[in-house]
Amino acid sequence: MKLRPASADAREFESRSFKALHEHLAGRSRQVRVLDLGPPTQSIVDYFSQFHARLRIVDLPRFARSRDIELAADCHHLAAERFAFEELLTEPDGPYNLILAWNYFNYFNRDTIIRLMSRLNEFCTRGTLLYFVTVVQAHMPDVPARMTLTGDGRMRYDSDVTYMRNSPRYAPKVLESMMPSFEMQHMFLLQNGLQENVYVFRRRRAEPRLNVITDASLVDFSTPVGASRARMPFLVTR
């Protein structure tokens, strides 16, 4: 089965979500606590330094690799696996006011998102904001793109991957079902096939049930475009 080739892609767009977050953070009198699930990025550090924020960087991709999470097709992307999320944030300094999940949900299946959010719920308080980007077009890079801030409320989305893969295209209702303690606050559909999402933590609710099937419960995001989806039981499309 042939893979769908892709060329280097760099997109810069106006982030309406970060403009709204800027106004929200600028109006706070107390120190802002931010949890960044991405790798260390100078533009992110510089941005939040203006708010005198306490920034905690977790680097979720590195965490996954350090736990010997299986990587599919020799690609350094986040495979849908049973992460030991109890090892994540072993020394937290929360509760956090803002969590940056970037575009990682696109590379997780339902069970993995539920496990991750169940862990993060422990470090949220009423009003905690969750920012993430979902892909609404049919295909996406086979590894998560790098997301950085360029100033003036603009964001850069860099992807230098070779191939494209099927996108899960999670619908808002599906996302809400996987994180019942959060409610959607803002959603901005961009012209570049991306969608910005800001959810707010209201109160801790019962977690949704996980699928009891073992191997079949894993979404194989390594399946190239055009291949069979028979092994993707929880791939959600519109």
Image (cartoon, rainbow, N blue to C red):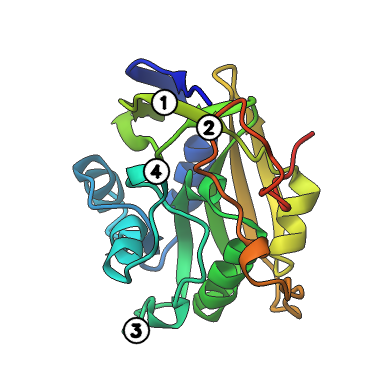
Q: Circle 1 sits in a helix, a strand or a loop, which is it?
A: strand
Query: At which x and y percent is residue 165?
Result: 52, 31
Amino acid type, mark 3? Thr
Alpha-carbon span between mark 2 and mark 3: 36 Å
Q: Look at 51% across and 71% down and name the residue there.
A: 82
Q: Earlier in the sequence, mark 2 or mark 3?
A: 3
Residue 205 lies, with reference to residue 238, above or below; the image says: below
Q: Look at 45% across and 43% down and name the residue there.
A: 22
Q: Earlier in the sequence, mark 1 or mark 4?
A: 4
Q: Which residue is mark 2?
A: 224
Q: Nearer the viewer, residue 155 or 79?
A: 79
- Mark in front: 4 vs 3: 4
Amino acid type, mark 1? Tyr
- Mark in front: 2 vs 3: 2
Alpha-carbon span between mark 2 and mark 1: 8 Å
Q: Circle 2 sits in a helix, a strand or a loop, which is it?
A: loop
Q: Look at 53% across and 32% down and name the residue there.
A: 224
Q: Residue furthest left?
A: 42
Task: Tell me, yes or no, whether the two marked residues, 2 and 4, touch with CB atoms within 8 Å.
Answer: no
